[in-house]
Image (spheres, rainbow, N blue to C red):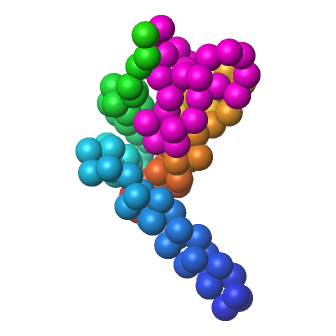
Amino acid sequence: MSDFRDIEAALHEAQELILELMPDNIRSILQTRMTSSFGAIYNWRRAVIPPVVEHALHDDTGRGRCPLCHRGPDQGVHVGFTLPTGLTRHLEGSHNFYRCGVMAVAEAVAKRTR
Ligand SMILES: [Zn+2]
């Protein structure tokens, strides 16, 4: 049991560190409070994802990498996601887009600290 608590504490520490490594303006978005009410996760994503998408830098084609993990689509010739739709799907992990790991961490911390 003690080992489990050690592992859990180490996980929480690593999650906090990931958020600490984000630029201040991005971190403040990701640290949006999540309520404990029904639909809290949905509402949290609706509050967090649009301002994160606004931080994406776009290229000449209007595409941009994720401002959280700096990744783009794994397939095709494009280096960035379409904005805002492709990046939103990456942040949500919807429509068969791989989910952003940083976003998953931010959501886990928001759930834990609500
Ligand atoms: Zn990402």
The answer to if 18 sits in the magenta stretch is no
State the image quarter where residue 16 is shown: bottom left
Query: Can you give x and y, in whole percent of width and height, for residue 52 in the image?
Result: 38, 33
- Residue sitting nearer the eye, 66 or 52: 66
Residue 112's place in the image compared with 59, above or below, is: below
Predominant SS along the magenta part: loop
Residue at 53 percent of width and 53 percent of height: 105
Can residue 111 be seen? no
Residue sitting at x 71%, y 16%: 76
Relative to the observer, which residue lies in front, 113 or 94?
94
Which stretch appears magenta?
Answer: 61-88
Residue 67, position as x, y percentages in the image: 43, 36
Can residue 5 be seen at all in this image of the molecule?
yes
Q: In the picture, which quadrant includes the C terminus?
A: bottom left
Q: Which residue is nearer to you in this view: 95 or 55?
A: 55
In the drawing, does residue 96 fall left or right of residue 109? right
Quadrant hosting residue 25: top left
Residue closest to the far top: 61
Using residue 28 as the reference point, say whether residue 102 is left or right of it: right
Q: Residue at x 46, y 41 (%)?
A: 68
What residue do we see at 33% from left, 44% from top?
26
Q: Is residue 71 left or right of residue 84?
A: right
Query: Is 77 inside the magenta-drawn segment?
Result: yes
Give residue 2's position: percent from left, percent from top: 67, 91
Decide: is 106 above or below 17: above
